[in-house]
Image (cartoon, rainbow, N blue to C red):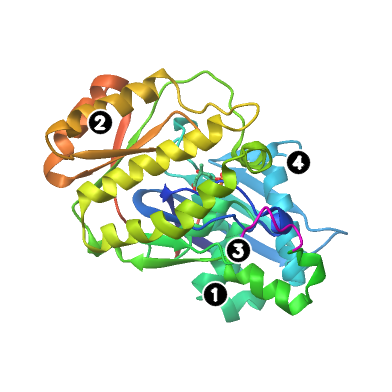
Amino acid sequence: MTTTAIAPTNIAILKYWGKNPAWEEYLIPTKSSISFTVDKLFTRTTIEAKPRGGAKPGIQFTLNGGRITPSMKEYEYVEDFLERVGAFFPFVRNYDYRIASENNFPTSAGFASSASGFAAMVKAMAGEIPEFSPIMDDDAKLSAIARLGSGSATRSIPSHGGVVLWERGVEFDLRDPQKQSSRMTKAAIEKAIFSSCARTVFAPDHWPELSIMYVKVKTEEKKVKSRPGMKASVDTNPLYQAWVDYEEAIVREQMLGAIRNRDFAFLSELIMKASNNLHQICFGTYPPLVYLNSTSVDIIRAVHALNEGGVKAAYTFDAGPNAVVFALGKDSPEVEGTLEGIVGKGNVTATRVGNGSRLSSDHLF
Ligand code: PMV
């Protein structure tokens, strides 16, 4: 059999940046995060799982039509992921895998592909492997499994998409390193692991006028990847715990309230502050992590200039210089024009809030 799944990318407005050190191996985050599911940027993945032939699972993997060989980093990511999932669901080790994955956007365009990539893989695996059938439609469980591939993939699973909340599940306190998972029973560990999962809080039709623009910024710089970067922030930034506590206790509810009320002005302020505070946490990491470049700063300035007479746009930045800018339909042509003036035509991709992961009958092989 073959199974194909589609999963969208998502853009976080309340960011995930760090794993709880007591739960590092299970990739449980220090804080909750909130994202918008994006309609137009997605990954399609086809999987065939056959009873295993050799000593360990064999993996045949193509990405955007190109063969991924065992020496390539993408191969390692998939192999690591299968190993982690195998720790909870040992039956995944009983298969050999043929996997083909395609993004409908250029991987090199700088849009995060690990979120949609791992989410599509998990959804397709769940449909393909018979032992997964009891949890096939359990978005909470599947999102926790996707987390084992990439944190942001957790939020690309919920099938209703829209606004997604990823609950951290386990409290984080750097001052209390005693909360070690090694002291807990297996059942308690499993409960904790599956409590860190994502769900839709507002469906896509809650706010259809919202436009989400992906802004590609030119860069030649090499960057520190998110995984080592966030670990360095947890380990070295003295304000890390304070940031987590503040966002968890205050910003999370403020953001959900602003979305509930469709209060674009307040939500924009919260989105921009949360992005700036993520990059403040990065800059306060030692050695500092600098993900924004001068074009990113030009975008920040241009958005604040646009907002002088009333809020029209909000920016957010992940671990790189590319921006994602939010605007309401009536203002989006003006906002898009301003962004194109900075990064050039063809570098702004307008999307909207969309659905989450789903199965598809359009197979890649
Ligand atoms: O999913 P990862 O491990 O690549 O981490 C993503 C981290 C950010 O994109 C910076 C924030 C987020 O919540 O998506």
Residue nearest the observer in this picture, 246 or 227: 246
What separation in Å lies between label 1 and label 2 (alpha carbons)?
42 Å
Is the residue under label 2 in contact with that under label 1 (CB below 8 Å)?
no
What separation in Å lies between label 1 and label 4 (alpha carbons)?
29 Å
Residue nearest the observer in this picture, 51 or 303: 303
Is the residue under label 3 in contact with that under label 1 (CB below 8 Å)?
no
- Tell me where the magenta segment starts and ends, as one range: 171-178
Q: Please tell me how crowded label 4 is: few (under 14), some (14-19), or many (20+) other residues with Cα within 10 Å.
A: few
- Magenta highlight: main SS: loop
Residue 215 image-quadrant placement: top left
Give the mark nearer the N terminus: 4 vs 3.
Answer: 4
Give the labeled residue for mark 2. Answer: 303
- Residue at image location 75% in from the left, 65% down from the top: 86
- Residue at image location 53% in from the left, 58% down from the top: 154
Tell whether 94 sits left or right of 42.
right
What separation in Å lies between label 4 and label 2 (alpha carbons)?
44 Å
Q: Which mark is residue 171?
A: 3
Q: Which mark is residue 136?
A: 1
Residue 257 in magenta stretch: no
Q: Nearer the viewer, mark 2 or mark 3?
A: 3
Give the mark nearer the N terminus: 4 vs 2.
Answer: 4
Q: Position of residue 87 (x, y in %)?
A: 77, 65
Of the residues shown, which amino acid type is indicated by label 4? Answer: Pro
Give the mark nearer the N terminus: 1 vs 4.
Answer: 4
Q: Please tell me how crowded label 1 is: few (under 14), some (14-19), or many (20+) other residues with Cα within 10 Å.
A: some
Local secondary structure at mark 4: loop
Tell whether 54 sits left or right of 252.
right
Give the labeled residue for mark 4. Answer: 70
